[in-house]
Image (cartoon, rainbow, N blue to C red):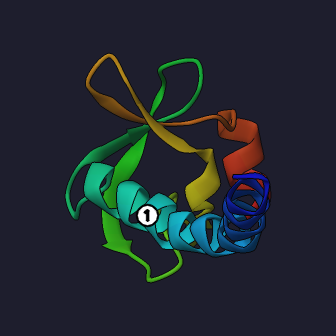
């Protein structure tokens, strides 16, 4: 019985890095599922920025803002009140140019 408990503990420890690796692609696909071409992107204060021009493989979105193509990082994106929202302010998005 004692050996079985050690076996379970060793198995769980060996699997935990594998489970963490499996979750990384899910986060990227989650970003891709909330962002789609044409969906309006708003900043953290609710100001409209621009529609999504392209969803990149890394989860970021490209928008055309004031005549420039800007890539907004995917880790700043979420859905708030049904709207695709970045945690950046409008001035922060302008600084990404």
On screen, residue 17 above or below 47:
below
Outermost residue, bottom side: 57
Residue in front for this viewpoint, 42 or 35: 35
Q: Nearer the viewer, residue 9 or 61?
A: 9
Name the residue at 32% across, 69% down. Answer: 53
Work out whether residue 62 can be spotted: no
**Badge 1 density bin: few <14, some 14–19, many ≥20, Cα 10 Å:** few
Q: Quadrant of residue 71?
A: bottom right
What residue sits right under mark 1 in the picture? 26
Considering only vertical position in the picture, is 7 above or below 47? below
Secondary element type, mark 1: helix
Residue at position x 32%, y 16% from top? 81
Percent x, y for residue 56?
43, 79
- Residue 41 position by quadrant: top left
Q: Residue at x 71, y 67 (%)?
A: 7
Residue 32 is situated, as x and y percent measured from the top left of the image, at: 34, 63
- Quadrant of the image containing the C terminus: bottom right
Residue 11 locus on image (x, y percent): 68, 69
Q: Would you identify the image quadrant in which residue 83 lies?
A: top left
Up/down of 18 relative to 48, above or below: below
Visible in this render: residue 3? yes
Q: State how many labels appear.
A: 1
């Amino acid at each position: 019985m004692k050996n079985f408990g050690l076996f379970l503990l060793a198995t769980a420890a060996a699997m935990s890095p594998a489970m963490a690796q499996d979750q990384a692609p899910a986060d990227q696909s989650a970003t891709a599922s909330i962002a789609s071409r044409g969906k309006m992107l708003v900043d953290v204060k609710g100001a409209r920025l621009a529609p999504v021009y392209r969803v990149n493989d890394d989860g970021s979105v490209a928008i055309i803002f004031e005549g420039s193509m800007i890539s907004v990082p995917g880790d700043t994106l979420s859905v708030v009140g049904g709207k695709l929202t970045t945690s950046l302010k409008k001035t922060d998005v302008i600084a990404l140019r």
